[in-house]
């Protein structure tokens, strides 16, 4: 009997995963965790599959109470984490005893935090994903009193084991501050902006408070489109940098409508999107031009780190007897004979 | 069964996880058939690392996981797919037809008169032109799988609203430029709303979420405001 996890203070939190990858084909945005690196890391640290459902917390304080012994991992923006009143570390597995409260306060420098629970949590899916979609009205937004059902309980782990340098095995915590450097590649319509397109690389932009999971609005010197005329609706990539108005630059994130009629000046790289996922209103953004080949290499390097982390976690969990391969642990005895 | 030879295309980088393929033949029908044929091919080719394809009028956005596959490899896949289009000879699915009851004007279509005035024709003529033609669903767009269609034979393109509405109801029947659309879900919108269908279009408990696919045929039919409630709660379904 898992007992579940009681949400005591939801702040602004949802259950999500890495995204609805089949969505765009049906006119739905991919959505999912905005900081993909932190979300994957949380799940790996909790011994889960990368795409397992987890909690995404945006900006506000959050509290939950475990009704059974569980194991969690908290990643993302810097914050104050306490478990049963004890200060605990982010970016490493943490044991929570039945009845204890997990408290997350003072998210700073970045905007979003992730809480993964070993064994993951139950949530309804749409096109194979639990990620909320605000447009079609799907998803699990947490409220005070929501009970999350975790799929597996984990007995209390004696803390000394976790003095093993789990979190010093090479996992790079994303650097977060209020001056962000974001890599982009040339967009498919860069030619439509002529020389003014260079402004993107020489100007500094300020993140507007009207930014959200659909897109970030940035104030600053704006490149101008030199061509005119109606553009046919086209599929736009996540990360598309557009200039839809004279006031702001728009950078589309994972909640973006899949089609639009604005020319795409540049596209933020996969790692750059994780940086923007942590941008707070008022933060300053500079863009740096890179190539697709370099962006891919950078992205693959960061994934390699996560793979290394996974091996370490598997080893440690194996020693501790924590099932980090749920699909094996959960097999009925008969299936193994 | 028609054999489609792919239109000429251009392929653009669109970040590290997507490519944009644009068909550039002179006939828009050929371009449309090409990008949708390619999207279907990519969807069914089972290549590892391909997330999917978003085809619209003359272009298709191909999304992929750059950890599993490189932009260069996807480009090669796209070229193979375009070649294959000319040889499989498989036509798209047989189009299904949908009958869409619409209450025009008034609270259901707040922009009907504005559109009539701008076109220099009567409200009745706007409705006649809108109900007169059959519409091919060109693609599924934002928001929520909207059926994007070539618009009615109005004299002029319809300008978008200067101040987009913060909320347009589900079922709104709208026009803009030379395009027509139905809104499956409540969303902000800058298109001119000329009517509303009482049928529900989106059902997130069903897969696919919307009943039509690109290539399907829609017809609009005028019904009176007194009929609106009679249709409420019914779903848009293909004609038998």
Image (cartoon, coloured by chain):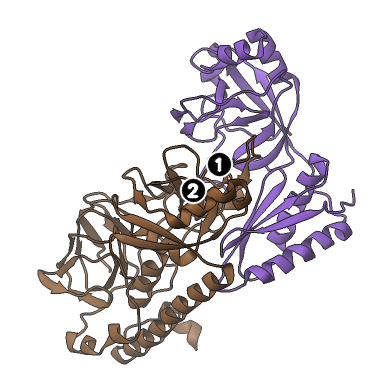
- Taking the spot 42% from the left edge, 42% from the top edge, the residue there is A248
Chain that is coloured purple in the picture: B
Q: Colour of chain A?
A: brown
So how many labels did they put on this image?
2
Disc 1 sits on a residue from what chain? B
Q: Is residue A126 visible?
A: no
Q: Is residue A44 above or below residue A314?
A: above
* A15 or A232, nearer to the observer: A232
Q: Quadrant of residue B97?
A: top right
Q: Position of residue A329 (x, y in %)?
A: 40, 81
Above or below residue B59? Residue A80 is below
| Picture coordinates of residue A116, whole percent (x, y) | 32, 68
Q: Residue at x 58, y 25 (%)?
A: B173
From the viewer's perspective, tell me whether residue A22 is left or right of residue A319: right
Q: Residues within 10 Å of mark 1 (few under 14, many from 20)?
A: many
Residue occupied by mark 1:
B142
For mark 2, what is the residue? A256
Q: Residue at point 78% right, 48% down?
A: B24
Give the alpha-carbon distance from disc 2 to disc 1, as whole Å.
Answer: 9 Å
Q: Position of residue B84 (x, y in %)?
A: 83, 62
**Which element type, helix, strand or loop, lies under badge 2?**
loop
């Amino acid at each position: 009997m898992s007992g579940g996890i009681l949400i005591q203070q939801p702040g602004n939190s949802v259950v999500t995963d890495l995204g609805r990858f089949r969505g765009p084909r049906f006119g739905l945005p991919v959505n999912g965790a905005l900081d993909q690196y932190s979300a994957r890391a949380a799940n790996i640290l909790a011994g889960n599959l990368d795409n397992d459902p987890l909690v995404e917390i945006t900006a506000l304080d959050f509290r939950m109470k475990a009704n059974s012994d569980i194991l969690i991992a908290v990643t993302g923006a810097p914050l104050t984490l306490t478990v049963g009143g004890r200060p605990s570390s982010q970016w490493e597995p943490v044991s929570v005893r039945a009845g204890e409260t997990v408290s997350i306060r003072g998210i700073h420098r970045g905007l979003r935090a992730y809480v993964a629970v070993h064994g993951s949590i139950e949530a309804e899916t749409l096109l194979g994903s639990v990620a909320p979609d605000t447009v079609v009205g799907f998803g699990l937004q947490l409220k005070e009193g929501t009970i999350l059902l975790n799929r597996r309980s984990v007995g209390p782990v004696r803390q000394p084991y976790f003095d093993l340098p789990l979190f010093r095995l090479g996992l790079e915590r994303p650097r977060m501050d209020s001056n962000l450097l974001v890599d982009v590649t040339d967009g498919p319509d860069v030619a439509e902006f002529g020389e003014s397109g260079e402004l993107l690389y020489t100007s500094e932009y300020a993140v507007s408070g009207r930014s959200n999971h659909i897109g970030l609005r940035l104030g600053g010197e704006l490149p101008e489109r030199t061509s005119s005329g109606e553009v046919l609706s086209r599929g736009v990539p996540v990360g598309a940098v557009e200039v839809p108005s004279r006031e702001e630059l728009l950078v589309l994130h994972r909640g973006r409508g899949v089609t639009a009629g604005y020319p795409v000046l540049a596209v933020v790289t996969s790692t750059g999107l994780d940086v923007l996922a942590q941008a707070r209103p008022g933060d300053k953004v500079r863009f740096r031009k890179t190539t697709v080949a370099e962006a891919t290499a950078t992205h693959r390097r960061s994934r390699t780190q996560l793979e290394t982390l996974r091996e370490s976690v598997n080893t440690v969990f194996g020693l501790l007897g924590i099932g980090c391969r749920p699909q094996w642990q959960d097999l009925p005895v008969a299936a193994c004979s | 069964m028609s054999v489609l030879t792919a239109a000429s295309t251009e392929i653009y980088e669109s970040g590290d996880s997507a490519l944009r393929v644009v068909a550039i033949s002179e006939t828009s029908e050929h371009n449309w058939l090409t990008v949708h044929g390619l999207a279907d091919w990519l969807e069914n080719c089972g290549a590892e690392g391909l997330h999917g394809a978003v085809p619209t009028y003359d272009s298709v956005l191909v999304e992929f996981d750059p950890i599993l596959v490189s932009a260069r490899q996807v480009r090669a896949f796209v070229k193979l797919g375009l070649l294959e289009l000319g040889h499989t000879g498989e036509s798209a699915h047989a189009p299904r037809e949908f009958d869409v009851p619409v209450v025009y004007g008034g609270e259901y279509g707040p922009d009907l008169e504005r559109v009539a005035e701008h076109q220099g024709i009567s409200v009745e003529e706007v409705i006649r032109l809108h109900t007169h033609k059959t519409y091919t669903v060109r693609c599924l767009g934002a928001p929520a799988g909207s059926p994007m269609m070539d618009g009615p034979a109005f004299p002029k393109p319809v300008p978008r609203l200067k101040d987009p509405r913060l909320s347009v109801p589900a079922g709104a029947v709208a026009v803009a430029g030379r395009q027509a659309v139905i809104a499956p879900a409540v969303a902000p919108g800058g298109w001119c709303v000329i009517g509303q269908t009482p049928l529900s279009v989106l059902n997130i408990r069903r897969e696919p979420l919307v009943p039509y696919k690109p290539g399907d045929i829609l017809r609009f039919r005028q019904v009176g405001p007194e009929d609106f409630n009679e249709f409420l709660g019914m779903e848009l379904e293909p004609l038998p």
